[in-house]
Image: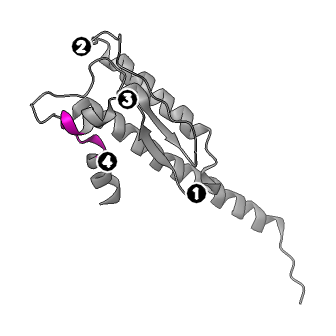
Amino acid sequence: MTMKLNTSFWKKLDQLEDKAERELETYVKRVADSAINATLESVSIRGKRGAVDTGAYISSFSITYGRGRPRGQSSRRKQRNNPNIVGLAEAAKANLYSDISRLDLLNTTRLTLRNNSPHAVYVEYKHGYFIFEKLERQFNG
């Protein structure tokens, strides 16, 4: 049996792929936005709002697939109580969006949001911001 697929079929298939890719990109950007917002808004176990001190933690988020190289900055020799929190957050968000733009979302089965700052464990658990736990609850129920 021979079937002929007209050009409108292929156009519709392309449109579906474009829509799927846009939806995936929107979802991954929501995850990125939530990571930045959680870092800015989370309250530590000591009652301090926002996990931004030097900017190293918020600047160390990355979205990778496979063995992609994660971004990570140390807080060593950085200004504490950095007054430019908004600028740091915008730069971190731009980094994550740049990561997302490089991904082939339709052909990727696993993405990883990471924070590779050397002190991420302290921010998460010792200071008690639990940012990744909050993101897990938000996106994985």
Q: Residues within 10 Å of mark 4 (few under 14, many from 20)?
A: some
* Segment colored magenta: 125-132
Q: Nearer the viewer, mark 4 or mark 1?
A: 4
Under circle 2, the secondary element is: loop
Q: Are marks 3 and 2 in contact (CB under 8 Å)?
A: no
Residue indicated by mark 4: 135
- Which amino acid, mark 2? Asn
Q: Residues within 10 Å of mark 3 (few under 14, many from 20)?
A: some
Q: Position of residue 127 (x, y in %)?
A: 18, 33
Residue 20's disc is 1
Q: How far apart, in angstroms, are the residues tagged by discs 4 and 1?
A: 23 Å
Q: Is residue 70 magenta?
A: no
Residue 81's disc is 2
Closer to the chain start, of discs 4 and 1, is 1
Q: Considering depth in this image, is 72 or 108 the residue closer to the camera?
A: 72
Q: How far apart, in angstroms, are the residues tagged by discs 3 and 2?
A: 18 Å
Q: Nearer the viewer, mark 4 or mark 3?
A: 3
Under circle 4, the secondary element is: helix
Q: Residue at x 47, y 36 (%)?
A: 62
Q: Residue at x 38, y 38 (%)?
A: 33
Closer to the chain start, of discs 2 and 1, is 1
Q: Which residue of the protein is positioned furthest toward the bottom in this rendering?
A: 1
